[in-house]
Image (cartoon, rainbow, N blue to C red):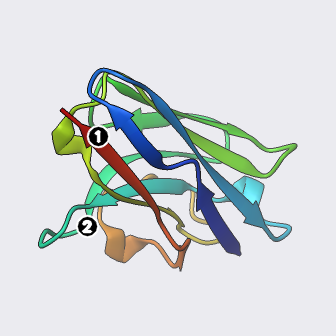
Amino acid sequence: VQLQASGGGLVQAGGSLRLSCAGSGRTFSNNVVGWFSQAPGKEREFVGAVSGNGGATTVSGRFSISRDNAKNTVYLQMNSLKPEDTAVYYCAARGSGVTVIARSPRQYLYWGQGTQVTVSS
């Protein structure tokens, strides 16, 4: 599974962004896909994840995750952004056959390259 995250950028506080994670591979649609954020000097943090059947969970109620398996793409919709949301955002997949959402980045086998989100005050 190969992943590519995109959609980051500079946005003012209160604004919105939608990140995309494009996946390749026959098993992508069955993979649990997670989003993680990593601010400078901090550990990578769980943002949310979506299972193969579309069930999703997020840490913040300002964010939502969805997937379009026909497009092999998972989305992270971020609303009411705050300066503290500034980070590099990564998408990751747990691997084929795994159906349970996990919060630890160690549980994810495949990673995209990350996309920078900067929220100005």
**Residue under numbered circle 1:** 119
Residue 88 on image: x %, y %? 36, 61
Looking at the picture, which amino acid does disc 1 mark? Val
Q: Quarter holding the N terminus?
A: bottom right
Vertical position of residue 118 compared to residue 78: above or below: below
Q: Secondary structure at mark 2?
A: loop
**Amino acid type, mark 2:** Arg
Describe the element under mark 1 as helix, strand or loop: strand
Residue 24 picture quarter: bottom right
Residue 119 picture location, percent across and down: 29, 40
Res 31 → quadrant:
bottom right
Instruction: Relative to 24, say whether 21 is above or below.
Output: above
Position in image of residue 18 (x %, y %): 54, 36
| Label located before the other in sequence (2 or 1) | 2
Question: Of circles 2 and 1, which is in front?
Answer: 1
Position of residue 116 measured from the top left corner of the image (x, y, whole percent): 41, 58
In the image, 25: left or right of 91?
A: right
Residue annotated with mark 2: 44
